[in-house]
Image (spheres, coloured by chain):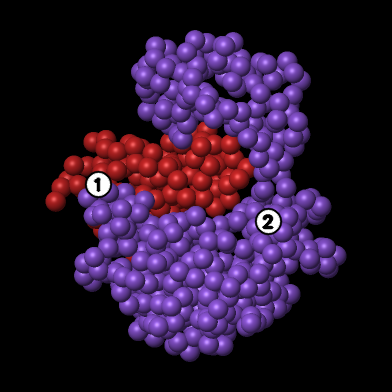
């Protein structure tokens, strides 16, 4: 079934120059494999569409049951150059929670 | 065990936080992080206007306010409040608190050496774009190298009550007391990395103690009285993140994880002047209410290059807003945007970028935003940037006339013409460590 990413994870986002990063943290250790399977760099890039001009890199932190997504050229020039309201990407993590992922009901059951 | 508290995550953070950290319970060290990436350039401009300025002006009055308690309880302060003028900052602190001993760390400011570096053949390529620094020669406003924790620890060793640095790595402020008190060596990579990770967790102040936290945010207690974070550091590198009893906010491993991942790149290689920390090695454990313990952090040797934070003049920008209301609020705002763009084109003005947002519809998330049917109101926000200041200035005259010349019902122009701002952009680059010599000075 399809659920939003928020069902399995929470996020925080910020900036590094013109790149944004989103930390995505699984709510439970057993959700971490779902996170790895579903929140692929390709799908995250496709989700953001024209908002992210460059590639998306993903780094795994199995100790924290989390991944770090690095979104290249995602802030309209970054920091002081950008004309965007969210020039620092503070809200990109929140909107990523709406990304639809495919899970088996049994994977979520307690 | 020593207690290191951070009372400021950026210049402009909550003024009461450091005072509450001193008043609310035991701490041994108070760190204050004032410098964001482009703060140095703002301070550089202030020093150009007045040679006695160029530092975080919130800092001296704060020290004046807490000086007696610092002395009575032997709390030491470490801050990067010095900006581009640490000596002037130290003198202002001594004026506000004459009984304190103040030491400064110098050597991070390399603005006067940029030509020398270029002549030596250092390209100082922009880490993000790969362009060589020579492409912005003549437009550089400030240049500072991130220095590490050892010079700060050396400053503590003078017996100073207050240690003032310019540009240092944010987390170094937290690592320095551990080096000073536990006698960690410059190649104790795992311990240094532990201190850096602890510093990274608390360097943004309350962002690890309940602020900006998604986890059940409606039920985080008493954010109005949020407690800023305290690291209880142990000689072997283990540490606990906590806050004073009776304060608001919440510290748990989920919130700490959010902050660990905040504004990082490759978590296996968090590069600092003192070591390279591996964030994938840390073990986090909830050990009690508002207590999270971190341990097991591994580190690798410090890099041969230091990062420089260079700022430069990158043109001008302005952004203006107008509000349109129901019915057809979005259609009216779109039409107004089209009119402004047409008028700018007819004037023959060109810009590097014209950026339009419809606030309430898609400002933060563009096409990712969920669709809204006929919203009750929409704020049109148009921004422009370019190298021609006159063009940007002319744009600022094109917003308000829409009220009488555009779609019906434009309002919300009460703040008048938009302001033209200089764009000070950030240029991260690398400089060989051997070129940088720091020194500590006690200011009388």
Residue at x 54%, y 36% (from the top left corner): A84
**Residue in the foreground of this view, choosing between B225 and B229:** B225
Q: Quadrant of residue A94?
A: top left
Position of residue B222 relative to residue B65, above or below, is: above
Residue at x 39%, y 82% (from the top left corner): B73
Q: Colour of chain A?
A: red
Where is residue B242? Give x, y as percent. Answer: 31, 69
Q: Are marks 1 and 2 in contact (CB under 8 Å)?
A: no
Choose the circle earlier in sequence order: 1 or 2: 2
Locate the N terminus of chain B and report the quarter of the image it occupies. bottom left
Chain letter for mark 1: B
Residue that extends furthest to the left in the rendered view of this protein: A110
Residue that label 2 marks? B46
**Residue in the foreground of this view, choosing between B87 and B434:** B87
Residue that label 1 marks? B218
Give the left or right position of residue A18, taking residue B375 as reference. Answer: right
**Residue in the foreground of this view, choosing between B371 and B63:** B63
Where is residue B14? Give x, y as percent. Answer: 42, 57
Give the left or right position of residue A1, taking residue B366 as reference. Answer: left
Question: Of helix, strand and loop, which one carries label 2?
Answer: helix
Q: Marks 1/2: CA distance?
A: 41 Å
Q: Colour of chain B?
A: purple
Chain letter for mark 2: B
Give the left or right position of residue B334, taking residue B85 as reference. Answer: left
Residue that extends furthest to the right in the rendered view of this protein: B119
């Amino acid at each position: 079934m399809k659920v939003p990413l928020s069902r399995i994870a929470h996020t925080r986002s910020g900036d590094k120059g013109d790149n944004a990063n989103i930390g995505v943290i699984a709510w439970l250790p057993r959700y971490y494999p779902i996170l790895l399977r579903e929140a692929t760099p390709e799908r995250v890039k496709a989700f953001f569409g024209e908002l992210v001009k460059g590639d998306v890199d993903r780094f795994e932190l199995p100790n924290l049951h989390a991944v770090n997504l690095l979104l290249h050229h995602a802030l309209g020039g970054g920091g002081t150059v950008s004309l965007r309201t969210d020039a620092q990407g503070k809200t990109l993590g929140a909107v990523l929670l709406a990304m639809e992922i495919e899970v088996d009901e049994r994977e979520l059951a307690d | 065990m020593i207690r290191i508290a951070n009372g400021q995550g950026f210049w402009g953070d909550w003024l009461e936080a450091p005072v509450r950290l001193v008043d609310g319970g035991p701490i041994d060290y108070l760190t204050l992080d004032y410098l964001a990436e482009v703060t140095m350039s703002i301070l550089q401009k202030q020093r150009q206007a007045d040679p006695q300025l160029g530092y975080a002006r919130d800092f001296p009055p704060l020290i004046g306010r807490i000086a007696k308690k610092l002395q009575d309880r032997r709390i030491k302060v470490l801050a990067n409040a010095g900006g581009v003028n640490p000596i002037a900052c130290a003198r202002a602190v001594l004026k506000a608190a004459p009984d304190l001993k103040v030491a400064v760390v110098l050597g991070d400011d390399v603005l006067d050496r940029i030509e020398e570096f270029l002549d030596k053949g250092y390209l100082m390529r922009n880490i993000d774009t790969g362009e060589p620094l020579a492409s912005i020669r003549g437009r550089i406003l400030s240049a500072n190298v991130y220095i590490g924790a050892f010079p700060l620890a050396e400053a503590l060793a003078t017996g100073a009550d207050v240690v003032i640095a310019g540009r240092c790595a944010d987390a170094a402020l937290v690592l320095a007391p551990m080096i000073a008190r536990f006698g960690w060596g410059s190649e104790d990579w795992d311990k240094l990395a532990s201190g850096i990770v602890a510093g990274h967790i608390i360097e943004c102040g309350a962002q690890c103690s309940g602020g900006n936290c998604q986890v059940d945010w409606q039920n985080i207690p008493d954010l109005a009285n949020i407690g800023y974070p305290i690291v209880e550091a142990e000689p072997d590198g283990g540490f606990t993140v906590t806050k004073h009893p009776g304060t608001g906010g919440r510290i748990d491993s989920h919130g700490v994880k959010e902050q660990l991942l905040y504004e990082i790149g490759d978590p296996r290689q968090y590069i600092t002047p003192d070591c390279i920390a591996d964030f994938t090695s840390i073990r986090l454990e909830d050990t009690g209410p508002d207590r999270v313990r971190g341990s097991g952090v591994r580190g690798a040797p410090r890099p041969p290059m230091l990062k420089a934070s260079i700022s430069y003049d990158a043109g001008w920008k302005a952004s203006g807003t107008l509000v349109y209301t129901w019915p057809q609020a979005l259609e009216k705002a779109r039409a107004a945007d089209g009119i402004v763009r047409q008028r700018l084109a007819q004037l023959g003005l060109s810009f590097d970028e014209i950026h339009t947002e419809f606030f309430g519809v898609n400002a933060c998330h563009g096409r990712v935003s969920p669709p809204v049917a006929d919203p009750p109101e929409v704020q049109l926000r148009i921004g422009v940037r370019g190298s021609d200041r006159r063009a940007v200035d002319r744009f600022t005259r094109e917003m308000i006339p829409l009220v009488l010349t555009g779609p019906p019902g434009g309002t919300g122009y009460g703040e008048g013409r938009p302001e033209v701002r200089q764009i000070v952009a950030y240029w991260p680059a690398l400089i060989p460590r051997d070129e940088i010599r720091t020194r500590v000075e006690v200011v009388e």
